[in-house]
Image (cartoon, helix red, strand yellow):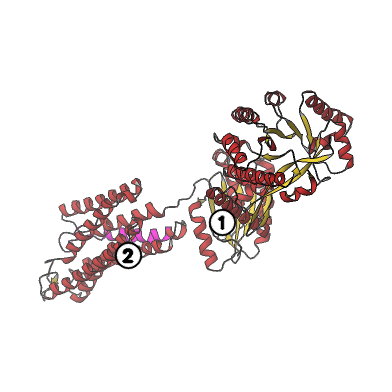
């Protein structure tokens, strides 16, 4: 990379230094316009390298141009030469410092290396001055004749070059192979060009050869190109730009447009491309458009530079509505403003993605403080669920057992119940199943929760029995994910046995699965556990997917009719006949029928007419802490 400079030997033309000057200026302009990644400390080094190389090229041009002119005083030549060498050395020092940061050297190693380099640089500068004074190094005599002599900086450049190559090779495993190959290739090419220059007795291209490795780190570590079709910048710069604006106190508006398959559409339609550019750019000053995965585009701008931003946003949405009428491409638009309640800049896009999953297509949503709170609540819940799963404590105090008593029509007593899960967390308080069950299932954390609720239900049952209360069983809900565990049956058996109750005191509630693999697993698990006396409920019959042939294959004990079927039976005589026929069919097949969602006497009477044997709902009780179930149980 940094071979011997030989400034005063060989022919010189300013072309190389002029090119280096031009490249430094162009790169500074591109850095400003292309939104490359500007990590504060590393980008600081890049900008100083460009500034130093400007000085290096300028000093070399002045020195080589005026060294042959007798009208120019020797001190000017000495100063230009020293500027050239000192700033080129400093550039090389900054390059080493930059590369060290990418190699994750220990602080003490980096400090030791930098001190050593600084000492060597200071020694070389001092020695060069001494050699010039004693006319052993570079000097100009009274006749304006100059001599190169011994050049200490040539040795310094060799030391720097060897140090860099040694460091890259020694720590190559800490770099991506493509980055390592890129850095080494540019270093080899730079030194090869300097050798060729020396062979042809040229000194014109030293500066530009030394600039090439500097350019390589911009490409390898800071590149962030535009998408040529959309004009969008890579999403990698988004968080940094938001952070910089917020640090300056600038309030921001962030607009996200998600159009599935948009990259394919825009490649085929120049008209659509024009409409797209108009929507995102025509009305907003000083905005940046980012491209995210899955065809999402995010436009950011500051309120300070767009004081009437509300009108601009409304106009953009109006234009977009007209474009939608023309192209009929599904979309989701989310608008968010910067907020003190957002903890981390990366959360801005996370909050947008979270709301994108919830909203329907062809709608526009504005993020509210409640949306932000919900996002953080969900994240907090997830962190707690992960902690619960990691602890594997079947008595974890954050999991509460609630239950809903079930009326046995034949006896008129509440002798069964359904166990229900609740979370009680420090920051959010009580959390209901519709808030945490989907999260637990999505992140595969549900199984541990299921085992905890089973364990706590068994423990409560044991206390009821020991206290002399009469209870047939309590049902516990399990998901298809639970059944996929090979250990499922052994875990259920072990928990029941450890609590010292009969197997028949527990029932397992499961929902029919559409998956063939899950159905076969369900069938195996039911048959294994039923042999022990455990009852099985088919939950939520009448919702989603119901396949009678499959239901007949699994020997369920109780079919739970969802409240939706009860509501359906109220619509007209045909609906009532349909639901009653289902119930009669199951009754004839020796299944017990349980109707959920009974809210009043009218519901109760209709269920009794439809062969119900068990009733559950708010008419009898809302879900209560399991200890309160004693109020519904008979005492022996």
Counting labels gives 2
Residue behind mark 1? 347
On-image quarter of the N terminus: bottom left
- Spatial CA span between label 1 and label 2: 40 Å
Residue behind mark 2? 54
Q: Position of residue 321 (x, y in %)?
A: 69, 48
Dot 1: what SS? helix
> Is 352 rendered above or below residue 247?
above
Q: Position of residue 475 (x, y in %)?
A: 70, 39
Does 526 sit left or right of 66 as displayed? right
> Is 590 rendered above or below residue 504?
above
On-image quarter of the C terminus: top right
Q: Position of residue 53 (x, y in %)?
A: 31, 63
Nearer-N-terminus badge (1/2)? 2
Q: Nearer the viewer, residue 236 or 195?
A: 236
Q: Position of residue 454 (x, y in %)?
A: 64, 43
Dot 2: what SS? helix
Which image quadrant is residue 40 in?
bottom left
| Span of residues in magenta | 1-30
Q: Nearer the viewer, residue 102 or 422?
A: 422
């Amino acid at each position: 990379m940094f071979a011997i400079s030989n400034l005063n030997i060989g022919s010189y033309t300013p072309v190389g230094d002029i090119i280096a000057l031009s490249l430094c200026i162009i790169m500074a302009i591109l850095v400003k316009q292309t939104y490359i990644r500007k990590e504060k400390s590393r980008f600081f080094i890049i900008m100083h390298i460009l500034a130093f190389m400007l000085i290096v090229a300028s000093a070399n041009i002045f020195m080589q141009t005026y060294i042959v002119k007798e009208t120019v005083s020797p001190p000017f030549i000495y100063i230009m030469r020293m500027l050239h060498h000192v700033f080129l050395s400093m550039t090389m020092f900054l390059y080493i410092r930059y590369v060290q940061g990418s190699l994750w050297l220990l602080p003490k190693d980096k400090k030791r290396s930098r001190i050593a380099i600084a000492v060597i640089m200071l020694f070389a500068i001092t020695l060069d001055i001494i050699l010039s004074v004693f006319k052993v190094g570079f000097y100009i005599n009274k006749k304006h004749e100059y001599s190169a002599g011994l050049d200490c900086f040539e040795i310094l450049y060799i030391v720097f070059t060897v140090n860099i190559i040694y460091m890259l090779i020694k720590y190559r495993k800490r770099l991506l192979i493509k980055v390592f190959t890129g850095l080494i290739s540019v270093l080899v090419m730079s030194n090869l060009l300097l050798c060729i220059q020396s062979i042809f007795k040229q000194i014109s291209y030293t500066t530009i050869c030394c600039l090439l490795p500097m350019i390589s780190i911009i490409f390898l570590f800071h590149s962030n190109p535009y998408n040529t079709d959309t004009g969008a910048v890579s999403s990698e710069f988004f968080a940094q730009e938001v952070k910089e604006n917020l640090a300056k106190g600038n309030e921001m508006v962030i607009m996200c447009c998600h159009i599935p398959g948009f990259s394919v559409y825009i490649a085929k339609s120049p008209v659509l491309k024009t409409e797209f550019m108009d929507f995102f750019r025509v009305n907003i000053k000083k905005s940046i458009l980012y491209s995210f995965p899955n065809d999402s585009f995010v436009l950011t701008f500051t309120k300070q530079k767009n004081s009437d931003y509300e009108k601009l946003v409304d106009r953009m949405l109006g234009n977009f509505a007209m474009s939608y009428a023309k192209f009929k491409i599904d979309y989701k638009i989310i608008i968010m403003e910067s907020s003190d309640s957002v903890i981390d800049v990366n959360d801005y896009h996370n909050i947008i993605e979270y709301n994108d999953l919830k909203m329907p297509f062809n709608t526009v949503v504005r993020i509210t403080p409640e949306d932000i709170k919900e996002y953080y609540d969900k994240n907090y819940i997830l962190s707690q669920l992960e902690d619960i799963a990691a602890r594997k404590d079947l008595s974890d105090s954050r999991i509460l057992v609630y239950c809903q008593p079930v009326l046995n029509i034949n006896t008129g007593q509440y002798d069964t119940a359904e166990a229900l899960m609740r979370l009680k967390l420090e920051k959010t308080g009580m959390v209901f199943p519709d808030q945490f069950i989907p999260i637990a299932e999505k992140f595969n954390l549900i199984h541990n929760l299921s085992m905890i609720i089973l364990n706590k239900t068994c423990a409560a049952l044991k206390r009821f029995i020991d206290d002399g209360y009469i209870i047939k069983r309590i049902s516990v809900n399990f998901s298809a994910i639970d059944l996929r565990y090979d250990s499922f049956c052994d875990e259920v058996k072990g928990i029941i046995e450890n609590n010292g109750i009969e197997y028949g005191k527990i029932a397992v509630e499961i929902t029919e699965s559409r998956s063939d693999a899950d159905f076969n697993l369900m069938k195996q698990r039911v048959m294994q556990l039923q042999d022990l006396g455990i009852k099985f409920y088919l939950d939520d019959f009448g919702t989603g997917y119901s396949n009678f042939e499959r239901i007949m294959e699994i020997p369920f004990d109780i079919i739970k009719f969802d409240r939706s079927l009860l509501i359906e039976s109220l619509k007209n005589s045909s609906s009532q006949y349909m639901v009653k026929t289902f119930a009669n069919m199951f009754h004839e097949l020796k299944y017990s029928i349980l109707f959920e969602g009974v809210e009043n006497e009218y519901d109760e009477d209709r269920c009794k007419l439809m062969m119900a044997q068990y009733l559950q709902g708010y008419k009898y009780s809302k879900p209560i802490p399991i200890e309160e179930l004693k109020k519904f149980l008979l005492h022996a």
